[in-house]
Image (cartoon, rainbow, N blue to C red):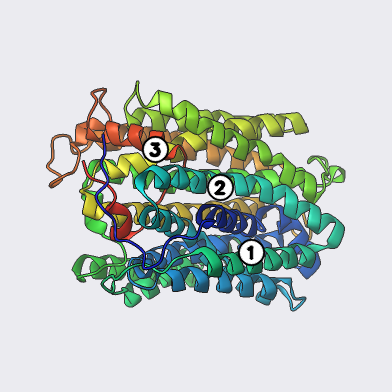
Amino acid sequence: MDKRTPAPQAEQPPHRLIVPGLVFIGMIVAIVSSLGAPLIPTIAETDHISLTDAQWSLTVTFLVSALATPVMGRLGDGPHRRRVIIGSLATVTVGAVLAALPLGFGFLLAGRGLQGVGLGLTPLGIAVVRDALPAERARPAAAILSVTTVAGVGLGYPLTGLVAQYGGLHAAFWFGAVMSALGLVVAVLVVPSPGPRPRRPVDSLGAVLLGLSLAGLLLGISEGESWGWTSPRLIGVLVAALVVLAGWVVLELRVAHPLVDLRLLRRPAVLTADVTALLAGVGMYLLISLVTRFVQTPRSSGYGLGASVAVAGLALLPFSAASVVSTRITRLLVRRVAPGVALAMGSVVVLFAMVMLTYARGAMWEILVLMALAGLGVGAIFAVMPGLVVGAVPPHETGSATSFNQVIRYVGYATGSTLSAVVLEAHTAPGHALPANSGYTVAGLIGCGMWLVTALASLVLPRLRRGAGAGPGAGSSKVVGGGATTRVDRAAEDLLEVEGVADVPEVGDTASAGRKD
């Protein structure tokens, strides 16, 4: 059984509404982040752009999140956590206002990028309750905060869809701006200042290099069809992005305080969790992007369901609801099988959902069923990941490892969002606004292949370095694929017992200080 070591105390007693306040903030962040997927066709129509370009309104949010999360985590570990939380919510509010103003797609895109900063707030909120509250209150509070992340998205899609349907596109973003402003007020009232802490240096150069490399790769993928897959411009962008990425890797391995600790990837369980996070992130947002576009496609095209943006949001509700239910089922599952097997089982469930999207998508009930299946599988995968990482690294490295897993996940989201647009654009005839129905079939087959690879990676990667030493505190490489009860297995089970949810990222040394084996 895990024991908590005394965490640094806040300088002031916690506000009596600290937990409801942080839950409200988490719900708002989830709702604001959900302003992307169902609104893509509406954005394309309003701003007179292609669906591929409109897809960037979702992709840019996750791209910024991938950069903001580790930076915010590093800053939040020092004496400025309260300022980071308040500043992040202020940034989200400004982004929502910028997106709401009728200034054109460029300003909307910039606003959506600023809103991506908010996705780094969940681990900071969990760190706040772990420091400010005693253990018996901190654990259930962390569970509630994590559930809020999933539930907020399920509420956000239909809610923002309704606002957009009856008030217009910009009304949806004004709604997000008002909600963000309310969250900012709540943060000022309930978030305590941390106690005395050493300052944590931020790897600014590493953040810049990571941003440039990811932006270059996503730009190359998204523009490949229009530029030509063998064009010198495309090849130049991709090569430059890969060179910058290689430079970032070298930098992270040499600096004293890296943005993310890449050395942790030498541990099989961590490598398994991160590769799975990347592949599952791609597969998940490939599915979500395809479903929201297909549901809104007019029936006059010869396919599609001709639904409104509000109905498209409601179509995603089974996904969020099932992902919450799945965490309860996974709690029982990890007691009987190894975490790697649980990851593979979740991937197979989503594979079935993707098969349905590929071959059985002609009715709304089929969409609802496949989204529920996808929620069960994705919920299981993201429920297992945190415990897999925590059980494989020493306590003082927990924050770095979970932070990187979060970054990888956001990169997967952005890639899946972009990939869906690229495939559909490739199946859109010149002069036509909508892709052929075969585009969804091809994209579905790609998604099936992605989830099959995810399942295989979950089973194979843990065995690649069987018996290799991973350093003090790390689990053996064979614990993930084997059936014995080991440190990794216990960590996955304990984390599900304590936090009971999918997304439970931890932040730096603050979060890891609360764990001791």
Q: Is residue 109 left or right of residue 470?
A: right
Find residue 462 and report its horizontal and vertical position in percent: 26, 36
Q: Amino acid at mark 1?
A: Ser
Compute the Cα span from label 3 to label 2.
15 Å
Among numbered discs 2 and 1, the one appearing first in the sequence? 1
Find residue 373 and report its horizontal and vertical position in percent: 59, 30
| Label 1 sits on residue | 57
Instruction: Residue 244: name its quadrant.
Output: bottom left
Q: Is residue 88 visible?
A: yes
Residue at 24% across, 69% down: 257
User: SS at mark 3?
Assistant: helix
User: SS at mark 1?
Assistant: helix
Query: Is residue 354 placed above or below 221 in the rendered structure?
Result: above
> Callout 2: few (<14), some (14-19), or many (20+) C-alpha neighbours within 10 Å?
many
Residue at 74% across, 63% down: 175
| Label 3 sits on residue | 498
Q: Is residue 436 visible?
A: no
Q: Is residue 219 left or right of residue 474?
A: right
Camera-side residue: 300 or 214? 214
Q: Are marks 3 and 2 in contact (CB under 8 Å)?
A: no
Query: Is residue 516 placed above or below 399 in the rendered structure?
Result: above
Among numbered discs 3 and 1, the one appearing first in the sequence? 1
Residue at 24% across, 68% down: 250
Residue farthest toward the top in the current orientation of the protein? 336
Q: Is residue 397 left or right of residue 112?
A: left
Q: Amino acid at mark 2?
A: Thr
> Callout 1: few (<14), some (14-19), or many (20+) C-alpha neighbours within 10 Å?
many
| Label 2 sits on residue | 148
Query: Looking at the figure, which quarter contains the C terminus?
Result: top left
Q: Amino acid at mark 3?
A: Val
Mark closer to the observer (3, 1): 3
